[in-house]
Image: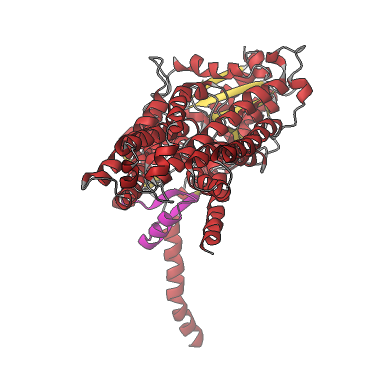
Amino acid sequence: MQPIRTRLAIAVVVFGALLLGALAFAPLVGSTPISLARVFDRSVPFADNLDAQIFFIARLPRVVAAALIGASLAAAGAVFQALLRNPLATPDTLGVSSGAALGAMLAITFHLDFSVSGLPTIPLASFAGSLCALGVVYALATGRRRGLSTTVLLLAGVTMTGFLSALTLFIQYLADFTATFRTVRWLMGSLDIGSYGPILTVLPMLIVAFGMFATLPRPLDLISLGADAAAARGVNVARAERSALISASLATGAAVSIGGPISFIGLVVPHLVRLFVGSDHRLVLPSSALFGAVFLIVCDLVARTAFAPIELPVGIITAVIGGPFFLWLLTRASR
Amino acid sequence: MKTMQARLAALPVIALVLLAAANQAAPPRRIVSLIPAVTEMLFAIGDGQRLVGVTSYDHFPPEVSRIARVGGLLDPDVERILALRPDLVIVYNTQVELKQRLDRAGIGYYSYEHRALPDITATLRAIGARIGSADRANAAAAGMERAFAAIRSNLSGTAHPRTMLVFERDPSSLRNIYASGGYGFLHDMLEAAGGRNVFDDLKQQSVEVTTEIALARQPDVIIELWYGDSVSALDLPRRRLAWNALGSVPAVRNHRVYELVGDEFVVPGPRVVDATRRLARTLHPEKYR
């Protein structure tokens, strides 16, 4: 086997090339044909240039948002799976996504979306929701004895997901009748953000999260052999776990606050990536982030072109593509 | 002898038929309406006093505040409806479960569905016939039709600007925009008010409008409808600001983005006449000086 550096270089180049291809191709396609020459035609002022406005306002922000959200959810999924040594651990199954959704929903329903003090309220509420959900789940899983019980963690996560979804529905039910439809639509996920504002507001959170992700691969590799083994090799297990949970919550909260709860990415992408790069987290984590970005860009491309000019909610596409694909992966793995 | 027997045998049948006819003829006196539009129709033809239950979302006319509330489209309170002992319930066509329970309870219902503009007057006439107020209902329906004809004739010969009629949007951004498609009462109201729907080709009641589609359709006018509890006139200029991002849309460039507030736009009852006049005044101010 080649040394890790070579394999990392190959993985980054291959997945990076895929991402660059998706980033370059996706903004060119949509429900309306546009001409690249007119997009970059400086002789027409931007305010009057329809092609440029479609390219820079309607398409580019959503492609960038898809890339960031896909990368965040996929990387968070990879971190959760490594940390809990369980292939089913994802932002969706641990209650993190539903916590983030509940936080965002509270902010939207109670009209906190006008950021009065300059602080973006929806991403913060979303992050607070994801962190609270994970905090409860984590406290339950570590409470009874030393170390982390992955069974308790997963069961508590599934329970929290159900509980928090019920709270979300409850708030919806109490809300103004006309707001009900808006919140239901929000829960299906959408990337049509129409400006760069939502991306810029969560960018600091994402930078912190990805900075923390960068320190995780080695501890995660050792933890996946067992907490005791990791401790014996000098890993501060408790600190690594904490930093993994916080960074993954941060990434999930940021992602959900832009696009709503988009499911299946945290589950499908890391597993798919492992088929190609193996289980070393120095490879899995960056590859998941890169391929997660590609996956969501492609799903969003399908969502906005399949029935154009009618658009499908992107969360439906990720589930419809991701679900059967994951089942196929399972049958393949069991053979 | 035989004819006598035959006549005697026929008596119960005749009695039953008469009874059924009498039953049919007795106009309902206790009506529960789960459709705000029909509630408004009943008040408009002077039969509002027969209503014993309305939805929790009714605001118009002010008299509805004195009537019992029984939930709405998604959450009708069946127990409360039955407790009001209605002899007619106005339900939405998709409330299948409610209809089954009313059937079991032996309570008559009228099944309603939002459709196009002509269906509003058709519903008015049908409801009138059902509750024994056909004359007044027909007169009210004819009055509405005359009003629409007057609006149309006033605007004949004017250029009809390509208009996007938005009935749902995030107040602070261009997300989750929904506009009237080329079918339904909103579409018909827009056409009657002298506008051409930019989504004419999409024969559905609502279209989810992405920023790309808003840009690509290039509407000359954008009219946004706001309703519900949380709208104040103060918010409207700020809500309009969101559109400034799309400078290449003619409506934005020419400052023809309008914000209108009122429940009458989304309740397809008798007030659609006023709502259509407001749309017409917005689209063709020169005709209403």
Report x, y in % for residue B208.
59, 35
The residue nearer to you, when weighing B61 against A159, is: A159
Residue ranking furthest to the bottom: B1
Q: Is residue B46 magenta?
A: no
The structure residue drawn at horizontal position 30% and vertical position 46%, both measured from the top left corner, is A228
Q: State the scheme by which the image is colored.
A: secondary structure
Q: Above or below — where is B102 with respect to A279?
A: below
Depth order, front residue of A214/A254? A214
Q: Position of residue A17 (x, y in %)?
A: 66, 35
Q: Is residue A166 visible?
A: yes
Residue reaching furthest to the left: A144
Residue A60 in percent (x, y) is at 63, 26
Residue A4 sits above or below residue B262 on the image: below
Label total for image? 0
Magenta stretch holds residue B102: yes
Q: Quadrant of the C terminus of chain A?
A: bottom right
Q: Position of residue B26 (x, y in %)?
A: 41, 54
**Quadrant of the image occupied by residue B159:** top right
Q: Is residue B205 left or right of residue A166?
A: right
Q: Nearer the viewer, residue B210 or B25?
A: B210
As drawn, is A64 to the left or to the right of B92? right
Near-viewer residue (B214 or A298) = A298
Q: Is residue A175 visible?
A: no
Q: Which residues are magenta?
A: B85-111
Q: Is residue B1 left or right of residue A148?
A: right
Taking B140 as reference, is B160 left or right? right
Image quadrant where residue A246 sits: top left
